[in-house]
């Protein structure tokens, strides 16, 4: 069996690894990657002589996929957890504690947001369960419309947007409720009588388990282990530009013919590649937009007076260019042990042009100045690295779940073709691992069927 995996990000690499597990050494696996390196949005480089992640840095530790994968690959000793410090929010020119017991920043009552939000907004949240509420089961809306209507626009700007800016490089206006907060949508569908009631019904029970995990030496270790243990042929610097049905399989231009194909490319590329083979799926994928972001990693003297917090998120409407600061050396004990301090400064939300408008030099200057503003510390970097991620994150807009269902329906009957990636069922690394595993299962089943019927 000759199988092509197009796209060498985490989704493509996990799909290839699972195919190797399912089909054994005789399967001819080829990973085709447009760039000169594997990993996609996962990239680890030396900063101050030590590995630092320049893309994703963590994963949701309460999901099982990544820890299980690390164990399978024999690199579980890489798993680390944060120190447990809380982040801050920068709003109205000062910092506040990020509210606890919220659902993506949506509070379950007034207590956790008192102080951060003004008295009128807190009173509005307290009063919300008494106001008439209607929700049509199955409906979708952008997060802004629902939360601003029920809890006030300041709740969005200061509590919800800072979190959506981190996860999706989006805003409450660009992100749909049903795809981003499916459990909340389900509680509303079940007949919750207010947003307060729906959030309360959805919050997980308090837990002392760490929310996040990471790899001690960065995601690069995972990318290398996947590539080594999959032992696929890797074709780099080669963008696939078309996918055409041929007798017995697929022609993947410009690389060759294959029995089966996994597309692990971002949504717009997938849409282009599916145009001939699955036009309805292609149209649905083309409707998924991407957001661009940039990261400046600052290496600072170890004694820089950073606050004892894991980071600072910035409310919308603040006169800063950065949207978030991860105080990596405070957040992660394994980084605190190093000789210098590391801070990741993030830029770019869907619809703004910060990342394209600023040169690398301007980004470093903005990162340094904005970090000094929010911490009050003197910031004198030893070194700085700029990493841009154009189109790095899919926007889960209202109607996203229907679009994904249309993609899946459009592939029905094409059992030797599968799609995977962060634009489908979750942008996080654990969701990508799950999506890739499902894509590999589909292709492995098709290959096994073809082998047993002698096709
Ligand atoms: C700045 C940033 C921070 C993030 N932080 C976190 C985090 O802390 N935790 C978390 O869980 N998630 C995080 N994410 C999200 C997560 O990293 C990504 O969603 C995930 O890595 C995407 O993986 P992927 O393989 O689906 O896509 P990608 O990584 O985008 O991989 C797709 C690959 O396809 C290749 N490609 C594109 N077109 C072609 C073509 N025509 N032919 C061949 N190859 C092609 C690309 O070069 C790329 O390598 C972050 C994302 C960003 C941008």
Image: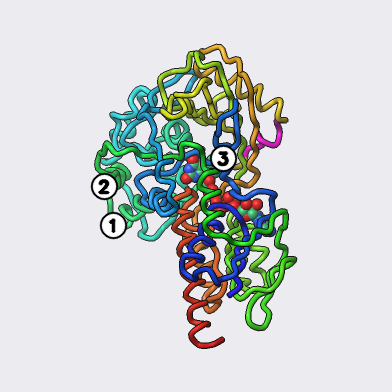
Residue ID at (44%, 43%): 59
Residue ID at (26%, 47%): 201
Q: Classify residue 151 as left or right of residue 391.
A: left
Q: Which residues are magenta?
A: 352-358
Q: Would you place residue 250 above or below residue 392 in this image?
A: below
Separation of residues labelled 3 and 2 (CA atoms): 33 Å
The residue that mark 3 highlights is: 55
Q: Are marks 1 and 2 in contact (CB under 8 Å)?
A: yes
Q: Secondary structure at mark 2?
A: helix
Residue ID at (64%, 30%): 385
Q: Are marks 3 and 2 in contact (CB under 8 Å)?
A: no
Query: Of marks 3 and 1, which one's residue comes earlier in the chain?
Result: 3
Q: Would you place residue 262 above or below residue 294 in this image?
A: below
Q: Position of residue 320 (x, y in %)?
A: 58, 24
Q: Is mark 3 within 8 Å of ligand 1?
A: yes
Q: Quadrant of residue 210?
A: top left
The residue that mark 2 highlights is: 201
Residue 190 shows which numbered tag? Answer: 1
**Which quadrant does the N terminus fall into?**
bottom right
Which residue is at the front of the view, 409 or 197?
409
Query: Of marks 3 and 2, which one's residue comes earlier in the chain?
Result: 3
Which mark's residue is nearer the viewer, 3 or 1? Answer: 3
| 356 in the magenta segment | yes
Q: Classify residue 3 as left or right of residue 181.
A: right
Q: Can you name the residue that lies furthest to the right here?
A: 254
């Amino acid at each position: 069996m000759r199988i092509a995996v197009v796209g060498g990000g985490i989704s493509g690499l996990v799909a290839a690894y699972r195919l190797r597990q399912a089909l054994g050494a005789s399967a001819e696996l080829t990973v085709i990657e447009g760039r000169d390196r594997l990993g996609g949005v996962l990239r680890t480089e030396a900063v101050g002589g030590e590995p630092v992640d320049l893309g994703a840095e963590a994963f949701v530790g309460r999901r099982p996929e990544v820890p299980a994968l690390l164990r399978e690959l024999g690199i579980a000793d890489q798993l680390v957890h944060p120190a447990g410090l809380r982040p801050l929010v920068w709003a109205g020119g000062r910092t506040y504690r990020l509210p606890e017991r919220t659902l993506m920043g949506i509070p379950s009552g007034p207590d956790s947001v008192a102080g951060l939000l003004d008295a009128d907004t807190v009173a509005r949240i307290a009063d919300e369960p008494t106001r008439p509420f209607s929700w049509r089961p199955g409906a979708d809306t952008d997060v802004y419309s629902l939360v601003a209507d029920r809890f006030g626009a300041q709740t969005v700007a200061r509590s919800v947007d800072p979190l959506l800016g981190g996860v999706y490089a989006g805003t409450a206006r660009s992100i749909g409720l049903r795809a981003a907060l499916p459990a909340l949508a389900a509680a509303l569908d079940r007949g919750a009588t207010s947003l307060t009631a729906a959030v309360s019904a959805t919050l997980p029970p308090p837990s002392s388990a760490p929310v996040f995990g990471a790899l001690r030496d960065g995601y690069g270790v995972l990318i290398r282990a996947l590539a080594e243990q999959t032992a696929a042929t890797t074709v780099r610097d080669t963008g696939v530009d078309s996918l055409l049905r041929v007798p017995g399989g697929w022609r993947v231009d410009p690389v060759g013919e294959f029995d089966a194909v996994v597309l692990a490319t971002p949504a717009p590329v997938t849409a282009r590649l599916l145009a001939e083979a699955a036009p309805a799926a292609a149209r649905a994928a083309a409707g998924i937009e991407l957001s661009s972001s940039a990261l400046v990693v600052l290496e600072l003297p170890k004694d820089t007076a950073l606050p004892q917090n894991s980071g600072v998120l910035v409310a919308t409407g603040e006169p800063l260019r950065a949207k978030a600061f991860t105080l990596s050396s405070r957040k992660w004990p394994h980084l605190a042990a190093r000789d210098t301090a590391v801070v990741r400064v993030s830029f770019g939300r869907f619809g703004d042009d910060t990342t394209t408008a600023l040169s690398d030099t301007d980004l470093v200057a903005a990162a340094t100045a904005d970090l000094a503003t929010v911490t009050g510390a003197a910031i004198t970097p030893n070194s700085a690295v700029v990493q841009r991620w154009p189109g790095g994150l899919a926007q889960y807009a209202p109607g996203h779940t229907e679009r994904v269902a249309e993609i899946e329906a459009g592939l029905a009957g094409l059992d030797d073709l599968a799609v995977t990636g962060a634009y489908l069922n979750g942008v996080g690394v654990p969701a990508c691992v799950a999506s890739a595993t499902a894509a590999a299962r589909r292709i492995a089943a098709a290959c096994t069927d073809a082998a047993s019927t002698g096709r």
